[in-house]
Amino acid sequence: MSFWTRTLLADAGPLLHGLYVTLSISLIAFVVAATVGLGICVARSRLPVLTPLFAVYIAFCRNTPIFIQLLWVAYAWYELLGWPKEVYTAAWVALALQSSGYLAETFRAGIDSVPGGQIEAAHALGITPLTTWRRIIAPQMLLTIAPSLMNQLIVIIKCSTLVSVIAVPDLMFQALRLTGIWGDPVPIMSFVAVIFIAVIMALSALSKSLADHTRARLGS
Amino acid sequence: MYGLSIFWDYRVILWHGLLINLLVFLLSSCLGLIVGLLACICRLSSLRPVRTLAACYIEVIRSAPELVLLFWIYSVVPVLLSDLLRTHLSFDPIVSATLALGLVSSGYFAETFRAGIQAVPAGHVEAAQALGMTGAAILRRIVLPQAVRLMLPELMSQNIGLLKTTTLVSVITVPDIMYQINLIVQQEMRPLPLYTGTAVAFFVLILILTSLVGRVGLRGA
């Protein structure tokens, strides 16, 4: 059987499921990381007492290799806390852990980019802090950091290939498994590499056009 | 402290593992810088096909996940080369790891070189030309001194990223520090102190390097 008949007949199912696992883990990790990053960013400005704690957290997330974080979450956390029980959970937790550190800094830069005078003006006009946040800070901040957010999503997808090491059945895991079954790494590995490169290139093209759009909108 | 003495018991193989990480890092960084510089020169070439080809290479290599490239070079390249040369070839995993990580970083290095060179104002080059300086002299005396200063902080942080990425090479059986740690975990069945200790050790190591680079970056600015 040639590679293409084999792929279309027998391996399409596992490969598609693998792609689904890769994308779903990446997306969950991204949403969790963005939420935690934003939470840290807001908490840091509200509770200056905790600043050193958050600084250590952010530095740890950013400076530890993702592979070590993954194994640490998957095996050390389980021994310590009895959680996460499934490798799938461990996978997105580890990916989110690393990105939350990067995204906390991204959000801070975004908030800092909104001129302080606008917030003071809103205050002087009697606009409540929540409305100020919702109508004045958030829209401008999101516009500024949208390209960085996209970039972090791309980083997560790239790092998500690592979860195959802890036996999460993602696209990379399926590629390795099918290599083992058919004993021929050349077509399947190349095919999967092309899929990954295509997905990531499409996302970076999207991110680039988003950045151009933002720049045109902000007129800088 | 309880549990951490395990690191002392296995200090010899852990030290050897760390040296392998450093070796892979140094080799792939050199390869990445050379290939990245070549790609950057081609990217800025006045010949259109050369420019397009280099742009494609940089774009594709920057889009490839490290682990995918690592496995691809480890498992596919020897087979293709063996078919091509009609002999049986096999690479040492360290060679595959160096090739993969070197190629991955070459894409990033090329873009950094390009950004640095293009950040030098065109007026400087034009002024030098007006003064009658030769092309080589302009490059050596005007463009490079400014460009190198601009790209140095970025290059350093990319190298730190590369050092972090070298922890991946254990998946293609390079006996680096994570390979040894995983073996010890299987032997002793104690993941908690081993993985926590490794995470903290790398955190401190990379943090020190990052702050050193930050200082160099400030001086350059």
Image: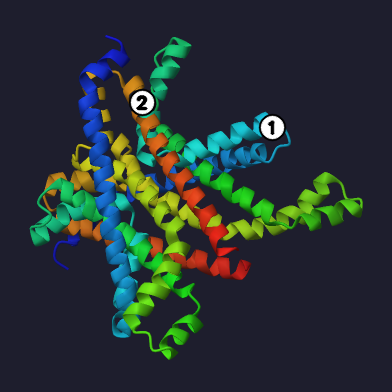
Per the image, label 2 sits on a secondary structure element best described as helix
The residue closer to the viewer here, A54 or B7, is A54
The subunit carrying tag 2 is A
The residue type indicated by label 2 comes to: Phe
The percent coordinates of residue B110 (x first, y second) are 58, 44
The residue closer to the viewer here, B210 or B3, is B210
Per the image, label 1 sits on a secondary structure element best described as helix
Which residue is at a point 46% across and 56% down the rendered structure image?
A147
The percent coordinates of residue B58 (x first, y second) are 54, 39
Which residue is at a point 23% across and 48% down the rendered structure image?
B181
Tell me the residue that label 1 is attached to: B48
Q: Quadrant of residue A35?
A: bottom left
The residue type indicated by label 1 comes to: Arg
Q: Quadrant of residue B96?
A: top left
The subunit carrying tag 1 is B
Q: Looking at the figure, which quarter contains the C terminus of chain A?
A: bottom right
The reply, left or right, for residue B210 in relation to residue B112 is left
- Report the disc number at residue A191: 2
Which residue is at a point 36% across and 51% down the rendered structure image?
A153
Q: Farthest residue to the left: give it.
A: A82
The percent coordinates of residue B85 (x first, y second) are 47, 12
Q: What distance separates the C-alpha of mark 2 from that of mark 1?
A: 29 Å
Classify A122 as above or below A210: below
Classify B164 as above or below A42: above
Say whether mark 1 and mark 2 are on the same chain.
no
